[in-house]
Image (cartoon, rainbow, N blue to C red):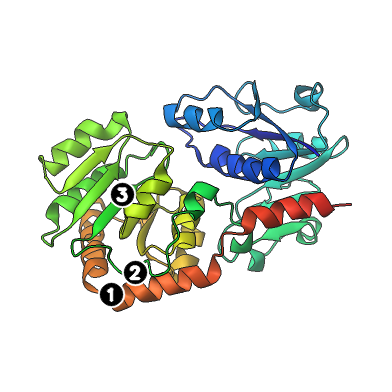
Amino acid sequence: MRIAIRADSSSTIGTGHVMRCLTLSEELLANGHTVAFYTSEIDVPWLRQLISELEIEMHYVEESSLSIEQFSNFNPDWIVVDSYVIPSSEISNLCSSVRTLAIVDLDSRGISADVFLDQNFNSENAVWPENVTNKLLAGVKYSLIRNKILSSRRPRPWKFKQHTPNILCVMGGSDPSGTIIPIAEALSKVTMEFTATMVCTPHWRNEVEKRLSHDSRVTILEPTNEIGHLYSQADLVVSAAGSSAWEICTLGIPSLLIAVADNQQLPLTQTREAKLALTLDRLSTEKDKFVQEIKDSLELLIQDELLREELSSNSLKHFDGEGKKRVVQALESHV
């Protein structure tokens, strides 16, 4: 098959849409399909590097643009669209010409498509429009997890690898909300023994360093496409509650997940209720209280091995890492 993928990323809108599409591309390529990626100019260096490592035909288009003419030279069998801002009518228009997969997050936005994909926890039990229900791949069994992430999965991730736990703090590929700053402030207040790696964009680095005051326990790195290696070294993770949250749950690493956008709030609530992770909602928490709650959550995770085991075991039970294979199989078998 020939699959065209349409998704955008930037330092302001984030990298999640492109990342999950690249993960889908990885499996499509492994199954012998041809992939062409259509995206706006990418201003995130580590993401450009990751794309260059895949054998994908790249086409650069205007951000949030979409038309069947964009794909005319490629002649696709499928078009995959992952966007919150491309008008639903423009995505729906594709269906009359080519089979279309729409990647959504708990809201189909009135889109008409041949297949819908929603990888959020418990999304299979959400209320969907009638025209979506029988075309829907929903729930974490369809979570798109890269091979480099899966290679970091270990049998007992709630056990610290050494006496001193290592905390990985990563707020997505670009962290437009700057949530890494209050995380740094919270780390500076933790009195227990730990080491930490903070993945921080250059934009926020000065503010992060100011909060840490040269704390020797903390190492600051720029965003990297080697996040799988960082996961392999981590005993605990603090992360945004976006698509990277499903990577962490798939690895079973005990974590604190933080909602930084309104579309993350419902999945965060359901994640907490299922006891997959500790959670915080930045959008509804006062700044001073937010810092304190990060500190308290980290200290609880450091202290309580039974809690870590519960969170980890629940995550591993729900997330098996086979999601991208199931999505590709669904496209291959679609009639």
Identify residue type, mark 2.
Trp
Position of residue 12 in the picture relative to residue 142 (left or right): left
Residue at the far bottom: name it: 306
Q: Quadrant of residue 194?
A: bottom left
Q: Position of residue 266 (x, y in %)?
A: 50, 61
- The numbered disc on residue 158 is 2
Foreground disc of the pair 1, 3: 1
- At label 1, which amino acid type do we have? Glu
Cα–Cα gap, marks 1 and 3: 20 Å
Q: Secondary structure at mark 1?
A: helix
Mark 3 touches mark 2? (CB < 8 Å): no
Comes first in the chain, label 1 or label 3: 3
The answer to whether marks 2 and 1 mark residues whose Cβ atoms lie closer than 8 Å is: yes
| Picture coordinates of residue 97, whole percent (x, y) | 87, 34
- The residue carrying pointer 2 sits among few (fewer than 14), some (14 to 19) or many (20 or more) residues within 10 Å by Cα, namely many
Decide: is 211 above or below 243.
above
Which residue is labeled 3 in the image? 169
For the point 70% across and 57% down, the residue is 326
Mark whose residue sits in front, 3 or 2: 2
- Tell me how far mark 2 sits from mark 1, CA to CA: 7 Å
- Which residue carries the number 1 mark? 305
| Residue 81 against residue 331 in the figure, above or below | above
* Mark 2 vs 1, N-terminal side: 2
State left or right for residue 174 relative to residue 145: left
Please indicate, yes or no, whether residue 227 appears anywhere in the rendered image. Answer: yes
Disc 3 on helix, strand or loop? strand
Q: Nearer the viewer, residue 90 or 196?
A: 196
